[in-house]
């Protein structure tokens, strides 16, 4: 698909009685920006499913909306996912968003259809040793640490833990059934972090969704810390 963008994701979880604690050594965060209206995306979707099985990776699939005009509206697409991809592009050196794009740790970008390139990019990453993140069912705590100038954003992510097969009726992937893994259903900025300990509350996930917390430099910067349940 024509290049128009770039992306990433990571977490290491330790079992706790009231939730998950993630710190240094967390898995690498891998974000895929994809669209059911893009004929180049099915191989990247399959690659993300493969990557999502790795215990050292937290993989997230964000469906963008700018290819909806090609005849098929992505059933998972949301404007906020498209906006996230656009935020990544300047720092990643991309001229604009494209699909399929994989962003690793918010620092590097690759074409998602090339599994060898993506795995090499993951292998070259070292997750930033940010503050401790404790994640419970309806609460998250971020510990003290060194914050970037201007602070950091705290993102609440809700995603599907299972593979979802979607029959596509029109557009470039017409009459194909496309598997999707770790589909992001919602992305919400729930606050900021200034380096001091901070608590955040939110509703429990519905419908079997899983939760992730991402601590990230603003405007598509690197991931600083993360946790998933």
Image (cartoon, rainbow, N blue to C red):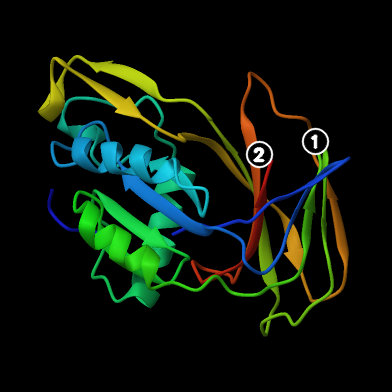
Q: Judge the density around disc 1: few (<14), some (14-19), many (≥20) Cα neighbours within 10 Å.
A: some
Q: Quadrant of residue 157?
A: top right
Q: Position of residue 88 (x, y in %)?
A: 41, 65
Task: Judge whether 22 appears above or below 205 on screen.
Answer: below
Identified at 11% across, 29% down, the residue is: 172
Identified at 38% across, 73% down, the residue is: 124
What kind of element bears circle 2? strand
Q: CA distance from mark 2 to mark 1?
A: 8 Å
Name the residue nearer the viewer: 61 or 67: 61
Specify whether residue 6 is in view: no
Name the residue nearer the viewer: 163 or 171: 163
Q: Quadrant of residue 206?
A: top right
Q: Position of residue 176 (x, y in %)?
A: 16, 19
Instruction: Left or right? Give the position of 86 relative to 131.
Output: left
**In terms of sequence position, does the residue under pointer 2 or pointer 1 come before the other?**
1
Q: Judge the density around disc 2: few (<14), some (14-19), many (≥20) Cα neighbours within 10 Å.
A: many
The circle on residue 137 is 1
The residue at which mark 2 appears reads as: 211
Contact, CB < 8 Å: mark 2 with mark 1? Answer: yes
Instruction: Left or right? Give the position of 186 relative to 144.
Output: left
The quarter in which the C terminus is drawn is top right
Identified at 70% across, 28% down, the residue is: 205
Q: Position of residue 18 (x, y in %)?
A: 88, 40
What kind of element bears circle 1? loop
Name the residue nearer the viewer: 57 or 213: 57
Q: Position of residue 102 (x, y in %)?
A: 33, 56
Name the residue nearer the viewer: 61 or 191: 61
């Amino acid at each position: 698909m024509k290049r128009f963008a770039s992306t990433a994701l990571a977490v290491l979880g330790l079992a706790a009685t009231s939730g998950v604690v993630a710190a240094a050594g967390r898995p690498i965060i891998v974000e895929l920006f994809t669209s059911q209206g893009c004929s180049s995306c099915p191989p990247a979707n399959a690659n993300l499913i493969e990557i999502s099985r790795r215990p050292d990776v937290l993989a997230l699939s964000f469906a963008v909306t700018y290819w909806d005009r090609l005849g098929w509206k992505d059933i998972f697409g949301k404007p906020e996912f498209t906006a996230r991809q656009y935020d990544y592009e300047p720092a990643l050196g991309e001229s604009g968003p494209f699909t399929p794009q994989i962003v690793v740790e918010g620092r590097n970008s690759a074409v998602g259809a090339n599994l060898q390139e993506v795995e090499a990019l993951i292998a070259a990453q070292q997750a930033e040793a940010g503050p401790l993140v404790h994640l419970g069912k309806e609460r998250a705590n971020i510990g003290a640490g060194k914050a970037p100038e201007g602070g950091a954003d705290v993102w609440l992510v809700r995603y599907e833990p299972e593979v979802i097969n979607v029959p596509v009726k029109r557009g470039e992937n017409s009459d194909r059934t496309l598997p999707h893994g770790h589909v992001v259903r919602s992305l919400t900025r729930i606050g900021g972090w200034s380096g001091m300990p901070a608590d955040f509350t939110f509703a429990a996930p519905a419908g079997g969704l899983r939760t992730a917390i991402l601590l990230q430099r603003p405007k598509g910067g690197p991931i600083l810390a993360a946790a998933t349940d």
